Amino acid sequence: MSIAAATNKFMLEELLTNCRKNLSKPRLDLIEKAFDFASIAHENDTRASNEPYITHPFAVANILATEIPFDDVSVVCGLLHDVVEDNAEYTSDSIKKHFGEDISIIVDGLTKIKNLFKGADINQGENYRKLLMSISKDVRVIIVKFADRLHNMRTIEYLNPDKRKRVAKETLELYAPLAHRFGLGKLKWELEDLAFKELNKQAYEDIKKKINSKRQEREKYIQKFSEPLIQKLNEQNYKFEISGRPKHLYSIYKKMIKRHKPFEEIYDLFAFRIIIDTDDSSQCYHTLGFINQIYLPVPDRFKDYVAIPKSNNYQSIHTTVVGPDGILVEVQIRTRKMHEIAEQGVAAHWKYKEGKVAPERTIDGYVGWIRELLENTGGEDLRKSIIDNFKLNLYSDEIYIFTPKGELRRLPQKATPIDFAFEIHSKVGFHCLGAKVNQRIVPIDTVLQSGDQVEILTSKNQKPNKSWLKFVVTQKAKSEIKKFLNREEEIFVIQGKELFEKKIKKLKLVFNSDEVNKLANNAKYDNSRQLYKEIAQGKVNLDELLTVQTEKDDKKVFDVNLEFETFQNYARTTGGSLVVDGESSQMLYSYSKCCNPIPGDPVVGFVTVGEGVKIHRKNCKNLISILEKEPEKIQTIQWPKIESSSFIVALTIRGSDSPGILHEITNTIVTYKNTNIKSVNIDSKHSGFAGFISLYVTDLEHLQRIIDRLKKLKGVSHVARLESVIN
Ligand code: MN
């Protein structure tokens, strides 16, 4: 037998022994098969430490057989967890073929998680979502992943510095909080301390040194504190275990930071723990009584998590008493089962699954929690915020709130009546108007205190608004409010868009999405969505908005007045003499400023003294009053005929730009009765065009025909004869 083979045999024996000891009815042949399968798959690989690769899956499987003992399937998956990723020849299908569907699904989930975080920014909410999704298929995915991460953290010194930092950060930000949520207290502490050591080695070593330097002193104190208590409990024939341990380093560090205090001033550096070997939780209360007989309890520092477990199922009595020498000491009292649940969480529940457990404390309860988190998470914003909510809801201390009927609800600290309302039902949340806290009416943003009794006041007319997001703290309330606001906004956007499109269609305007955005920006809105929303809510005068816009556009391209003047001068000077009573006349004349007639308009002359004849349009308002007063001064005149009986006229034209549109316009004009074009001045503006065309027509009917034909062109939204703009 080769050394490698002998080593493998030794590892396998150790693993099987541990499984026999800690798991219920493990299928040892299945574990052996997985071990052999993994050994062959990793045959030629080594770890960063230069050890054969199989030592890693073995260690992971061994953690699953000893520290987080769950079941044989988890151990098998621990052995197989790196097989698919590291070896292209081993596929998900081959796992399924050899080990069945359940195991292949878990291994698949583990492979996906690995790929998810490979070199990726761990702050990506989407990755978290996917991670949770793979856990929700089978909770054992995360159990195995925890074991994998624990072993990787224990052997992190072999990795390069960059990778070490990344893995440690990810451990602290993601895996430790998740471990906490799954009730794996011991795992959480170890992960935190290992990551802490990587990320802030100096602080870690400093605290560690200080704790060690006081070890003797502390052990003496523990003895002094315990002695009378041990005596008392022995008198009662209790079977128990008592220990006084320093808290883990990272929690001490966090306390120093939070309280702005040096190590020396942190008094609760260690906690006493009394574990009673009994299924009778009343012994915990009796023990509390004995402690209080010996040491004075500190009021307000008592917590009963036995009667009211934390949402991760943690149970214990916490009390702080004044110990010998006036030192404050925290004591935790729990039964053996409570202890196992506190240390191994979800894994311990598996073990106790046969017993009577509240629904929320079963495996299904954990998986259900993940599903709920996922269901309440959708859309880009929400995905981005998932990590924040995640950490908040995983770590923050809980408060306990009672319904008017006395039912208990757990909420994170700083929760408000709105959070509580959403906890009861999203409909209650949506219509929450206020609340009665301990029978007194309070505003909806009141911060609730543990023990408050809360009655929610609702109104059909109430609905969530943006300001709620500033004070709610639960993931559920946040995502429900955001979902509601998004829905509401979407409806407004759709309505507003419809109104807008109807309007521009009526005005024959054409806008592409860029132009709508530009229009929105000009009107001081962030984007078209916001504009639509405001339109739907009746906050925008569409006529005004569109008029201002088109006028602005025209101005940008050309000066209308200037264009008109140029045209007018040209029109008036090209024709030669005016025609009076059918004959060319040399008389003095000028154009009246009130109606600004241009050649082609039906006109009459008004004979003045000194200024010759003033030419008015026939429909000029001023002319009507003149006609009444001095009808004799009116003279019939005609425009001079030029270019084979034609008048010159000008058109303004607008529309959306498209290839060949200019050609189409000119073509439409010239193909009608050989109409002559004098000039074309058309400019493109963003994706529309606007301009002037001057052309020769025989009469107004001729002009009207051309206008009608141009209006029918696709992309042309506006055609009109250019008349006076001075009036
Ligand atoms: Mn691994």
Image (cartoon, helix red, strand yellow):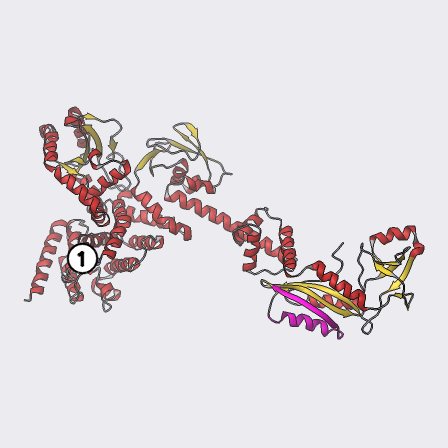
Note whether 141 is above or below 270 in the view shown.
Answer: below
**Residue 263 among those drawn in magenta:** no
Q: Nearer the viewer, residue 645 or 242?
A: 645
Report the side of 417 relative to 315 (left or right).
Answer: right
Do we see residue 225 in this rendering?
A: yes
**Residue 661 among those drawn in magenta:** yes
Q: Residues within 10 Å of mark 1 (few under 14, many from 20)?
A: few
Residue 528 x %, y %: 54, 54
Residue 692 x %, y %: 69, 65
Label 1 CB sits under 8 Å from any ligand 1 atom: no
Residue 214 x %, y %: 13, 36
Highlighted magenta segment, given as a residue range: 659-684
Residue drawn at (31%, 52%), measured in percent from left and top? 132
Amino acid type, callout 1: Tyr
Report the side of 601 relative to 259 (left or right).
Answer: right
Q: Which residue is mark 1?
A: 158
The residue positioned farthest toward the left in the image shown: 1
The residue positioned farthest toward the front in the image shown: 610
Residue drawn at (58%, 62%), measured in percent from left and top? 686
